[in-house]
Amino acid sequence: MKPSDSPLPRTGAQLLIDSLKVHGVDLVFGVPGESYLDALDAFYDAQEQIKFVICRQEGGVANMAEAYGKLTGRPGIAFVTRGPGATNASIGLHTAFQDSTPLILFIGQVSTEVTEREAFQELDYRRMFGQMTKWVAQIDRPERVPEMVSHAFHLAVSGRPGPVVLALPEDMQSAMATVADTARYQRVAAHPGVADMNQLRTMLAQAERPFVMLGGGGWNEQACADFQAFAEANALPVGCTYRCQDLFDNRHPNYVGDIAVGLNPALERRIRESDLLLAVGPRLGEWTTVNYTLIDIPRPKQKFIHVHTGAEELGRVYQADLLINSGMPEFAAAARALAPVRAPWAEATLAARADYEMWQKPVAAPGALNMSEVIAFLRERLPPDTIVTCGAGAYIVWVNRFYRYTGFRTQLGPTSGAMGYGVPSAIAAKLVHPARPVVSFAGDGCFLMNGQELATAMQYDAKVIFIVVNNGIYGTIRMHQEKYFPGRVIATDLRNPDFAALARAYGLYGEIVEKTADFAAAFERAWNAPTASLLELRIDPDAILPRLTLSGLRAAALENRKR
């Protein structure tokens, strides 16, 4: 939609929806609420331009909007009602903040005439969301709508991307104003300086054992291609940080593994022994640094270059020899343009790749259903453009270790470790890319945190294959209990429903799989089903991680206590 040259009087709600059209919004996720009835009515006249996806709980709303932001680079748009609706949506805001994902959450708000009285469902969102967003504001006057919505879009995508919250008082939505529309937002990002890129090349030329850690937000497909070309030209070994494996094609000979939970010991050793560490994009948080032990604080022992979209992150924990504040597309293009250096480490990169391929071979595991063999099958069976989503839990270690993500945005997962992400993110992925296969993984505990969104999948014919890994426990917490409090298990056993029957109750295809040998045929039935489908994999709870069993953890912990 083009800005209006001669504006007519419009309500605040009409100005809001017209602003969304100006900024190119095509999908909105929401749960309707009485606090934004005027905005809902304005959506009625915009149905040809904007599709309003009705969700079943605001946690699903925010996660879908976050997934949209990851997939497109444009702000995911979420609409929720005040109070309970906003609090339910907070989990998606936190995920967007930690993942550097552009997202705008619009919240219906009480009328301005009753603010500060603790009116029905009233909350102060500036105080509530202040630490997990880039900006929180309330639009009190309708003539400010175009201005503040434009600022929200610019802020969400510029610098380090992230979430923004705008509250919409009821009386503002119905009030009239005559004001012009803005132009469409533009992304603003820092560019690396010539001197910085020259210094980077000099440091690379002087290295003997360089290593690249790739991660963070703000990437796009071209940026990934540019960086892959740079790594290839310089024979660099590349590891991707937690939940960012899709930034570099895992089939590429320069890809050497993920730097996350369940880190390959051979890969960890290579990082520790490197003499130049180039971190491009990641925040270098707890999971990526093995609880802040992988890299020395504050001064890494190796030469260190850190590139990040947000200046506030540079030097925050680790003091680097070279700090570069840049958008990822801008840095990747500049890196690709550098003349390659002599790479005496090329054979070491091939050896690191061999370690990765060995790490991906299926392993023995307790029980009749082996997750490593299931994922190895999917690695060969799924088309390269498949999008794989995961929530949080021990089960993700099996997926991320044995699967190979083929390129930009074939993986969706929360670096925040938020359970309940896998189901709604998969639905959003299918709505954004209806022609691409989408497979969603969830643990039994993870699934039930947003599993009600199966109704959304059914309503919008989003043909996702949902895989529920059911071991009857909150696995990650049980694992920690057995390690630190062996034999003192409490509050981690789960009595689950029949997940396949639950899927059928929603009108989807559902099937239980209990043996490795039965999975391939079951998957084909799910693949060919006319609707979305759910496969419930019942696995032995002792098979907690590829390298660990619960019984082994317990025995080791008890033995340590005897010493």
Image (spheres, grey):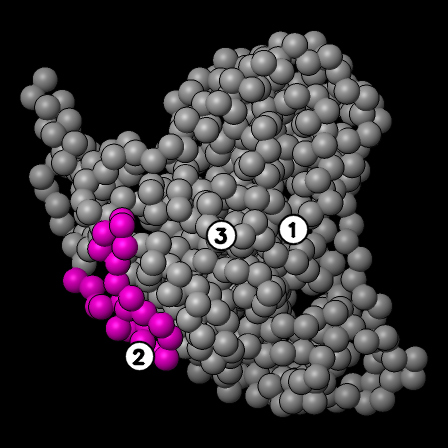
Q: Are marks 1 and 2 in contact (CB under 8 Å)?
A: no
Q: How many marks?
A: 3
The span picked out in magenta is 495-518
Tell me the mark number nearer the camera, choosing from 3 and 1. 3
Label 2 packing within 10 angstroms: few (<14), some (14-19), many (20+): few
| Badge 3 or badge 2: first in the primary sequence | 3
Residue 465 occupies quadrant: bottom left
Percent coordinates x, y for residue 322 in the rendering: 69, 22
Q: Which residue is mark 3?
A: 382
Of residues 158 and 230, the one nearer the viewer is 230
| Vertical relation: 328 (above or below) 206 | below
Q: Is residue 535 left or right of residue 101?
A: left
Question: What's the residue type where badge 3 is placed?
Answer: Leu
Q: Which residue is mark 1?
A: 161
Mark pair 3, 1: CA separation: 31 Å
Of residues 196 and 410, the one nearer the viewer is 410
Q: Looking at the image, which residue is at 66% across and 21% down?
A: 235
Percent coordinates x, y for residue 212 in the rendering: 60, 26
Q: Which residue is mark 2?
A: 505
Residue 342 visible here: yes
Mark pair 3, 2: CA separation: 27 Å
Of residues 143 and 266, the one nearer the viewer is 266
Secondary structure beneath label 1: loop
| Vertical relation: 489 (above or below) 180 | above
Q: Looking at the image, which residue is at 59% across and 33% down?
A: 252
Label 1 packing within 10 angstroms: few (<14), some (14-19), many (20+): many
* Residue 76 magenta: no
Q: Are marks 3 and 2 in contact (CB under 8 Å)?
A: no
Question: What's the residue type where badge 1 is placed?
Answer: Pro
